[in-house]
Amino acid sequence: MDQRQQIKNALQLCIDKRKDELHALSWDIWSRPELAGEETRAHDRLVHFLSQDDPAWTVQSCYKLPTAFRASWGPVGGGAGYPVLNVAFLCEYDALPGMGHACGHNLIAEITVLGTPAEEDIGGKIELIKAGAFADIDLVFMAHPAQQDASFLPCVALDEVSVKYYGKASHASAYPWDGVNALDAAVLAYNNISVLRQQLKPEWRIHGVIKHGGVKPNIIPAYTELNFYLRTPLLKELCDLKAKAEACFRAAAVATGCQVEMTYPPNTFCNILPNATLANLYEMNGKELGIQFPKEPANFSGSTDFGNVSVIVPGIHPFFYICTNALNHTEEYAEAAGGEKAQLYTLRTAKALAMTAVDVVCCPEVLRQVREDFSLAKLKQEK
Ligand SMILES: [Zn+2]
Ligand SMILES: [Zn+2]
């Protein structure tokens, strides 16, 4: 048996041996969900887990962000004959408002070691990129719970816009002509966007809510607020969608006589760049462990801050089935993510990811291919 296979077998045994501990860790995070940026307990629990018994680990808590961490392992200078590579496994552990772990991040936390918080909100990985946390990383691996096993599913670019209309209050019955109706502006904006949809490309998405719609029927609303998400398959297409959406928001202000204010959060989520070599290796290793990959994977179009990482470091972000037909971001999915049945699928995914890392670390030719795929995907993205 070659050395690569020996390492793969050993790592599978290692995960199997610690499966109860890993389940307890994931369950602990699941049972006390914390929102994006507030994951202090999950952070402490993961840091403690990684620091506990092996002196080869160097664990840095609160790494560049209050609830991020970094745990490094490895002989100084790398193994004899192999390239010195810094391989990072990323983990998420933030929950959703009012729903707990409905995206299954407690399962991701079980298998990985660069702690990257706040995926569901500001995009913690983007903040970590800005802080230089990925500067010395050669490869990144992460996997995310979903409805099926897939080495790659399209994750689209995302921007968020907050739209505020300022009008003028007045008595809605006695002096309506004295008012400037900000709710009318919000309703027109919502309808303008609905009309715009017919003219958008099939993969483009725009969806929103009215966050503030007025106070009382007898007061002409002086202030309203909407929140929209804009998504396109490629980052560069977002500018076009933003321009179209902004025209809709402005038109509503002109029609009603309101003032409009549009603001964007600092972080734009990028689409994930594919890496064919890593994806093929992941599938090969996964099949060895009994993972079945559908011939035609779903055309998923969520977004993740891993996209921004995939543009600066070669990596993969496969998806995995957790034994439920429920959809992410529902209460049923949260329940499945905390259940016993999800464990087999999570640990199997952990093994396939680790085996894929072994394939790259042990073979300079594979590493060369991975880097070539990365350069090609970047060129395509920028063209
Ligand atoms: Zn998620
Ligand atoms: Zn999510």
Image: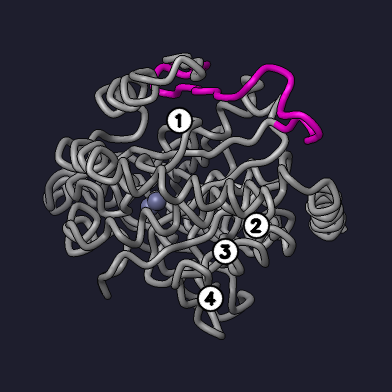
Q: Which residue is mark 3?
A: 285
- Cα separation between marks 3 and 4: 23 Å
- Position of residue 108 relative to residue 295, above or below, is above
Question: How packed is label 1: few (under 14 Cα within 10 Å), some, or many (20 or more)?
Answer: many
Q: Which residue is mark 1?
A: 115
Q: Secondary structure at mark 4?
A: loop
The residue sitting at the front extreme is 1
- Cα separation between marks 3 and 2: 16 Å
Question: How packed is label 4: few (under 14 Cα within 10 Å), some, or many (20 or more)?
Answer: few
Left or right of 176? Residue 187 is right
Q: Which residues are magenta?
A: 62-85
Q: Residue at x 51, y 77 (%)?
A: 293
Q: Nearer the viewer, residue 198 or 130?
A: 130
Q: Secondary structure at mark 3?
A: helix
Residue 182 at what x, y percent from top left? 34, 48
Residue 191 at what x, y percent from top left? 42, 69
Q: Which residue is mark 4?
A: 299
| N-terminal-most mark, 3 or 2 | 2
* Residue type indicated by callout 3: Asn
